[in-house]
Amino acid sequence: MSTGIIQNDIIVIGNGMVGHHFVEQLRNQNSALSILVLCGESSLAYDRVHLSEFFQGKTAEDLALTSETHYKSLNIQVEVNAWVTEINKAEQTVTIKDGRQYAYQKLILATGSFPFVPPIPGNHQAHCLVYRTIEDLHAIKASAAVSKIGTVVGGGLLGLEAANALKEAGLDTHVVEFAPQLMAVQLDPAGGAILQDKITKLGVQVHCQKATQVIEQGQQCRYRMVFADGSHLETDMILFSAGIRPSDALAREFDLQIGERGGIVIDDHCLTSDPNIYAIGECALWQNRIFGLVAPGYAMARATVSHIVGANERFTGADMSTKLKLMGLEVGSIGDAHAATSGAQVYTYENQPKGIYKKIVIEPSQNKLIGAVLVGDTSDYDTLLQYALNGIDLPEYPESLILPSTGEAKQLGADALPTAATICSCHNVSKGDIIEAIDSGSNSLGDIKTCTKASTGCGGCAALLKNVVDAELSKRGVEVKSDICEHFAYSRQQLFHLAQVERIEDFETLLHTHGKGLGCDICKPAAASIFASLYNDFVLKEQHVGLQDTNDTFLANMQKDGTYSVVPRVPAGEITPEQLIVLGTVAKRYNLYTKVTGGQRIDLFGATVQDLPDIWGLLIDAGFETGHAYAKGLRTVKSCVGSTWCRYGVQDSVTAAIDIENRYKGLRSPHKLKMGVSGCTRECAEAQSKDVGIIATEKGWNLYVCGNGGMKPRHADLFATDLDYPTLIAYVDRFLAFYVKTADRLQRTSVWLDNLEGGLEYLQDVIINDALGINDALESHIQTVINTYQCEWKTAIESPDSRKRFRQFVNSDAGDSRQLFVEERGQMRPATEQEKAERIDIVEAL
Amino acid sequence: MQAPALTQNTLRNEDTFEWQNVCTLSDLIPNSGVCALVEGLQIAIFWVASKEQQACSLYGISNFDPIGKANVICRGIIGSIGDEPVVASPLYKQHFSLITGQCIEAPEHSLRIFAVRLVNTNVQISMLPMPMSVTSVSANEQTTS
């Protein structure tokens, strides 16, 4: 090899999802190899699977899978804009477009694929686009802004996703498909017909069996697509999504073996025709097949890593079964969906009123499931997939697998699965891996998720994973205990139900009838929260006082020196100059430290317990209410300035936020609740980091749930889109009541959702479709809380009994002599221990 | 701060309690705490009222949290660990026995405890070291001096 060229053990060309997965896996297995990534584009790997979420407000950063910093931390070299122009197989070097050369021991081609644009005359015009990269999405967005009608060419999986993107962008959307049905690869004609019917009802017009001949200038719209049958369609923009082609040009030019219809030929180790060059992902051709899904690409990446480090994992093809949700429609396809295997027999179930179609394909001589089609309801997908992948013998009546449940659970027991069964296909976690994790000490679902990564990809296997984990744990005699503490053999949810059903309103009774001992600092505040959620009594009623954490007892937040901070409610952060002056006056009078909070309010620190009632007297006189900063309950609803002032705002986010904050103030919950309302998709209120996030759209409001900041930040999940305001409020009512009733003690909504069996889809089913028939009850619960709202501080200072509690000593008017302050930056702060020692010495010496 | 006062008490060397009134029952809150200032010491007084036992118990314990270093013990939640009545510090939630004053999570810390009783409606306290907790008091003396 020539000198002056940088030597590398491994060079990877391409940084898509598969190339990135390869790099991470290799680094995981070997920390010593020098790795160089040559990325032809300007941005590193991002999540293409969730690309359509770009139109729901996700940004390029949200979709990013890695960063240069991340690669640096893994000791991986990376060059962006490094388009490779030459491979020298004999010298084992590559050259990039600016002439720089790099030498390799092993070269990995992960160049991916490009969208196929059918050779139709007129297909290169300005508003004829493809749907593949983030740049494409920017172009689509720009084009959509000046278009009314958009048409997708291609009715496959990606085409329908693209159609959804156009619909999200607000266009009248059409889909043109050459084949007689939609999703012809994954679905049979009957399934395709149901899908078409449902998609049409959602407002997307579908035109099957149409071959576009030419794209010419339109009369009403920008373009006119003329079809082979003589008909035509007018549209302002065209999106091609007619399949992919492997990006094999480089391999072709430098004489690696290429398949007849394209694709770099690889063996089971993903080796190409050159012994030092591998190809993985959508550019690779294995047994004459291109795999256009991410999971097989990941499997290729793992096989390559295995070969490089001398292990023996091979690529043996991949299951192309898929489950997805298109515009809210569930679609699933497993194995031989078309019953093409000779001798295959099918069972079908169709429910036209509900738009549900299910088919299973079986091999009768072997008694195995070999394929399935599910449209409208994919709840059986996981079970069917396990039957198919693991060759499990069918039950006596195979149709029971897809017939509507008549009470008997048909879910496949975890014990029926062989050890080798794949539970999580995203991260390739088998039942054996889970057993191993349990044997080496993991004993909760959370632990197992952390250590195996199972169910942390698409999350589709969550229910199955829980099933397996529970079965394995109970086999080992591990009782999954959810007791809240030693005084109650119940979880918070069970206690909530006991209190509700038996109408228990005080802790003495609850303890006497269901618990033992004196209670503790775990069960008492939990009980207080339950009583508050159920009955919304004054929290400082005599029977409740002893249950409260100190913050609730004194309706303020205790700081490290035993003083308290005071936070009046400032709904949505809107505050008048007069109110600001009052806050300033009070702070000066009581020598309080003031700081603006992250929730758009003003926090006044350093109030002594005996000053609290007087401080609140002044605040209440000026029209302030308690801000519940001390409570496990609704804190704030943060908002941007919205359409009233902002050039970009599309809705009045401030009015909405004020309304929402006033609606839910005083609601006690298992943990604190934060909300945000943004007036447009720029999201200045950071609503997606809140328990309830609301983002204005031109048509209404998008609702996000279960986000949080803090120690373990979580982006909120998109729950429903384009809601009108009354529906939005109804959903939030139900969501909050359901959370309050079912969450564990101190469980934020994010963790609650992660532990909710069925996850987001289940939550949507409960709240949107009223699957449990409890929505009326949930709404009336919230209404009760609203009807019984009181400003706790107002009640507290008006009651002599409550007011009496706010003193440092029962037998003296003195204050706490250890609460000492020093001045810093023009305000006071608590003295440090050392400062106190010095001051106290002086005082004592005197 | 506390060590000199303790020494004074020990020097009195009396084996009978000297009771003094600090407040009345109406100043206390059932199953909660208040603080009294007695001879310069802050003393948290807890009233544990249990329906089950048909009885009320009063406990006195130093108000100073040696871990959080603030006078806040009276604002903690009371409860039990096994049969032992305890108070949880409102700052960092360590539990202190209301019988011995010892911290459950960090046994090197102990709080001084005081005898408290109810005479008619008067809440009375004795500033003498309690016999059953002499060891814990001396432990306290070591850590605070």
Image (cartoon, coloured by chain):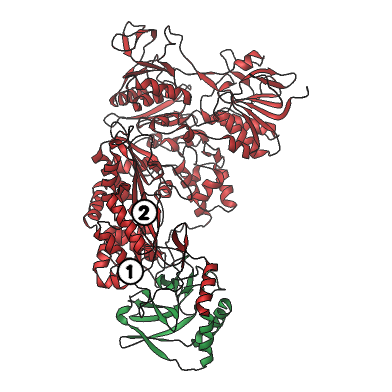
Of the two numbered discs 2 and 1 in the rendering, the one whose residue sits closer to the viewer: 2
Which residue occupies 37% across, 78% down? B47
Disc 2 crowd, CA 10 A, few/some/many (<14, 14-19, 20+) = many
* Image height of B93 relative to A33, above or below: below
Q: How many numbered dots are placed on residues in this image?
A: 2
Placement of A732 over or under A57, stated as above or below: below
Can you give x and y, in whole percent of width and height, for residue A311 in the image?
68, 35
Q: Which mark is residue A119?
A: none
Supply the letter of whichever chain is green.
B
Q: Position of residue A114 (x, y in %)?
A: 52, 19
- Give the position of the C terminus of chain B as an image quadrant: bottom right
Can marks 2 and 1 be said to lie on one chain? yes
**Which colour represents chain A?**
red
Q: Chain of mark 2?
A: A
Instruction: Look at the image and tell me whether residue A772 can be seen.
Output: no
Q: Nearer the viewer, residue A200 or A682?
A: A682
Q: Which residue is mark 2?
A: A602
Please indicate, yes or no, whether residue A722 appears anywhere in the rendered image.
yes
Image side of residue A771 versus residue A282, left or right? left
Can you identify the residue that label 1 sits on? A545
Q: Is residue A684 left or right of residue A110?
A: left
Where residue B101 sits in the image (x, y, percent)? 49, 77
Give the amino acid type for the residue marked by disc 2 in the picture. Ile
